[in-house]
């Protein structure tokens, strides 16, 4: 469908006044043909493949950004989950691969490279063990590499051994980056029902069913949706749904326009538009503020989960009308540190970890950029991961945990990361133990929802 000149003018107004941007243009690259006879040869093949496919990404996106007058915040690379590379690798071998990935990401000028990942929802292969155990050292030694592990799915159930291990990995990653407030955990996410075409970090990777190379786009736009809702302060929910859908339609059209232009310029297949509303620390670029505009006094008040469900559903409906190629997460992100309204809600006591968990049952992701005390036990982190995995598995949706046990910090204190990562107030966790639950191990069988063939 062609883009009308009026649409472009309206989009420019959104970018200048309402904080609209393309959050990321992510190029996905398959590394399945990069295995060689030695580790050094494999690393060189990985480096050469990534440079060949992505060396023009940054200059192309920057040129299109100027041509269209549309802000594009990030340029990123996603790769085949590294644990799926052929050959058998040790923990140290995987760290060396991570260092190679970090150097090549710097060489081509991207913000992040994601896909230092493993898929263990049903069990471990040998490389999965090695890669997961290497994550704290790999993340601690790199700047741009992002990691994810999928521990559960509706079809497979929940790998509780992996859940237990990820609690330990998160704590070790925080300690390895303690001098930066545990920032390594901002580049590590644990998933249930992970999508294979997600352009957002830290959870992006290039799935095994994806083409050789593909362009995926992640849009933003909480400020645009907030502005639209504020024009209808007394509208009923039927009218409000139409307002959100129409706004999401326009934002998605803009994202696809950019994505298709980049894919054409690079000669790479266009993949998907991720519809997720991704907030920033700017005051009005906030999902929490949208929920308050819908009608709750403060994000976290009773009714917040309902408001989020209304927002999420209508963003999806509007986006699906705008594009036939929608994927990734596609919904509303609620990262605490990256959303000014969420930060304020935590500080005033309106949002707790338990309320956030309830909200994740209807939004597109899970507990995101949540800071907790640095002395939180690994078993408690595992319990939080298990809760989110259960929500995802039972409801057949993607959920995730990106949690930061901030070394040396206590409840009520904050850690400042700056940029899009923002500032995270440290939230309280339950003082009661879930150790016995986590120590049971094994695999939680798939629920009946998974038996739907």
Image (cartoon, grey):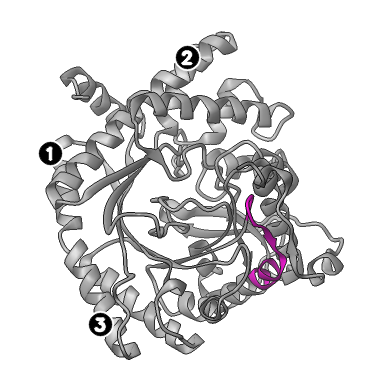
**Mark 2 residue element:** helix
**Which of the 4 image quadrants contains residue 404?**
bottom right
Residue placed at 38% from the left, 51% from the top?
199
- Residue on which the image places disc 1: 67
Q: Let me know if residue 382 appears in the view.
A: yes
Q: Earlier in the sequence, mark 3 or mark 2?
A: 3
Quarter of the image with the N terminus in it: top left
Q: Which stretch is magenta?
A: 153-167
Q: CA distance from mark 3 to mark 2?
A: 52 Å
Residue placed at 70% from the left, 45% from the top?
394
Q: Position of residue 439 (x, y in %)?
A: 81, 72
- Residue 314, relative to residue 349: is it above or below? above
Image position of 49 (left or right of 210): left
The verdict on residue 277 being magenta is no
Q: Earlier in the sequence, mark 1 or mark 3?
A: 3
Residue 381 or residue 119, whichever sits in front: 119
Q: Let me know if residue 407 appears in the view.
A: no
**Mark 3 residue element:** helix
Q: Residues within 10 Å of mark 3 (few under 14, many from 20)?
A: some
Q: Disc number at residue 242?
A: 2
Q: CA distance from mark 1 to mark 2?
A: 31 Å
Quarter of the image with the C terminus in it: top right
Q: CA distance from mark 1 to mark 3?
A: 35 Å
- Residue on which the image places disc 3: 44
Q: Residues within 10 Å of mark 2 (few under 14, many from 20)?
A: some
């Amino acid at each position: 469908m062609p883009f009308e000149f009026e649409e472009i003018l309206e989009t420019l107004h959104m970018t200048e006044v309402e904080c609209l941007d393309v959050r990321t243009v992510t190029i996905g690259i398959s590394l399945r043909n990069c295995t060689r006879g030695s580790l050094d040869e494999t690393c060189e093949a990985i480096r050469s493949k990534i440079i060949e496919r992505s060396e023009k990404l940054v200059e192309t996106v920057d040129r299109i950004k100027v041509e269209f007058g549309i802000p594009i915040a990030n340029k990123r690379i996603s790769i085949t989950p590294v644990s799926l590379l052929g050959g058998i690798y040790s923990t140290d071998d995987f760290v060396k691969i991570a260092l190679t990935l970090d150097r090549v990401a710097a060489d081509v000028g991207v913000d992040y490279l994601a896909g230092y990942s493993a898929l263990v929802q049903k069990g471990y292969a040998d490389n999965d063990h090695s890669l997961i155990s290497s994550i704290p050292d790999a993340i601690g030694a790199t700047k741009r590499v992002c990691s994810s592990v999928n521990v559960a799915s509706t079809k497979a159930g929940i790998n509780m051994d992996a859940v237990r291990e990820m609690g330990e990995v998160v704590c070790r990653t925080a300690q390895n980056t303690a001098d930066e407030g545990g920032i390594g955990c901002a580049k590590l996410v644990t998933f249930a029902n992970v999508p294979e075409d997600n352009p957002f970090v830290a959870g992006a990777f290039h799935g095994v069913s994806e083409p050789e190379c593909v362009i995926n786009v992640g849009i933003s736009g909480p400020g645009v949706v907030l502005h639209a809702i504020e024009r209808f302060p007394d509208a009923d929910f039927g009218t409000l749904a139409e307002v959100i859908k129409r706004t999401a339609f326009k934002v998605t059209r803009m994202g696809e326009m950019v994505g298709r232009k980049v894919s054409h310029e690079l000669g790479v297949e266009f993949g998907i538009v991720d519809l997720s509303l991704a907030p920033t620390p700017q005051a009005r670029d906030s999902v929490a503020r949208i929920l308050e505009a819908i009608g709750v006094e403060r994000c976290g008040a009773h009714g917040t989960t309902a408001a989020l469900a209304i927002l999420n559903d209508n963003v999806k409906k509007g986006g699906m009308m705008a594009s036939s190629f929608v994927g990734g997460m596609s919904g509303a992100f609620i990262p605490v540190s990256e959303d000014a309204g969420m930060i304020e809600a935590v500080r005033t006591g309106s949002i707790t970890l338990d309320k956030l968990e309830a909200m994740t049952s209807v939004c597109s992701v899970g507990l995101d950029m949540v800071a907790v005390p640095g002395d939180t036990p690994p078993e408690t982190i595992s319990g939080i991961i298990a809760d989110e995995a259960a929500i995802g598995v039972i409801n057949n949706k993607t959920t995730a945990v990106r949690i930061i046990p901030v070394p040396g910090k206590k409840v009520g204190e904050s850690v400042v990361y700056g940029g899009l990562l923002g500032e995270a107030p440290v939230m309280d966790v339950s003082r009661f133990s879930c150790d016995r639950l986590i120590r049971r191990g094994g695999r939680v069988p798939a629920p009946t929802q998974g038996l739907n063939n």
